[in-house]
Image: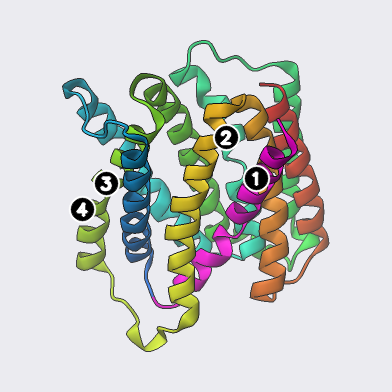
Amino acid sequence: MPLHAIALGLFIHTLWGGNAVAVKWSLEAFPPLWVGFVRFVIGTAAVGAYALLLRVRLWPYPGEWRAFAVLMLVFVFQIWTMNVGFGATTGSLSTILLSLNPLFGALLARFFLSAEHLSPMRIAGMCVAFAGTAAALSPESNSGLREFMNPGNWIVIGSAVLLGARLMYSARLVRESGELRTMFWMMALSLPLFLAGAAATETIQWSHLGWRPVAGLAYQGVVIAGFCFVANSFLLRKYSPSVVVSFNFVSPIAGVALSILLLDESFTAGVALGLVLVAAGLTLVTRSR
């Protein structure tokens, strides 16, 4: 990869690291399902515009609707659990725990991609990363059993499992249907469910509306679901996917730094050790592909 492509890859994953901060800001006024709905209205429009610009067919073929519907259901539950979990724990731990998704994806790859196998380097990377998770949640490095027993942390881990499964399932669809059509319909089909669930069960706290919730929603929709997806798809088309995904280790580092800077969170010994081990494990897993 040339230097400008490397810089773009690092920039994208740095922006992805800010997702936890953006979600926590938006949750100050908007409940989890409303956050998902607004975010993916913007994301659907951005991806649709990009597809039109490239003259990519968006309307599915008859045999694609069922696969897109299954992907959408996993997607909705994954985003909902992510938003709920992010709201119940710190931004630093949210970033570290959600970044485990490539490891769960590698474990689940055998169910979706028959050619995938666990190499010794990938297994070693998983062990290192899961050791980092244990360090981040260690009672000895936090206030008693607070972080280990916090259900928010385990909800985020559950979301990481769903995200890994979604990425492996969508990898097969991308090969058959193309990346833009797959991602567009995953988001577009999710909008009625997000809206119905939000309208039926959630209430927006209009009294808490300020620049932070609005900025958080805009960041998730425009920057994450819009720019980052489009820019990453550009890199995936031009360069080796195994090289592009090797930048994954940047996201937890950026996420922890931004959480400390923008959410006034403390940098504990457990978070520090967990961050180093998870980043190292992600590097081993992605470099083994």
What kind of residue is marked 1? Leu
| Residue 227 % position (x, y) | 49, 51
Q: Quadrant of the N terminus?
A: top right
What kind of residue is marked 2? Leu
- In the rendered structure, does residue 11 fall within the stretch colored magenta? yes
Q: Which residue is mark 3?
A: 188
Marks counted in the figure total 4
Q: Quadrant of residue 214?
A: bottom left
Labelled disc at residue 95? none
Which-is-in-front pick, marks 4 and 3? Answer: 3
**SS assignment at label 3:** helix
The residue lying at 61 percent from left, 48 percent from top is: 12
Q: Which residue is mark 4?
A: 192
Q: CA distance from mark 4 to mark 1?
A: 34 Å
Q: CA distance from mark 2 to mark 4?
A: 31 Å
Which-is-in-front pick, marks 3 and 2? Answer: 2
Please report contact status of discs 4 and 1: CB closer than 8 Å, yes or no: no
Q: Nearer the viewer, residue 27 or 235?
A: 235
The residue lying at 61 percent from left, 27 percent from top is: 239
Labelled disc at residue 235? 2
**SS assignment at label 2:** helix
Question: What range of the chain is rendered magenta?
Answer: 1-29
Left or right, 153 with respect to 247, comes to left
**Residue 7 visible in the picture:** yes
The residue lying at 70 percent from left, 47 percent from top is: 250
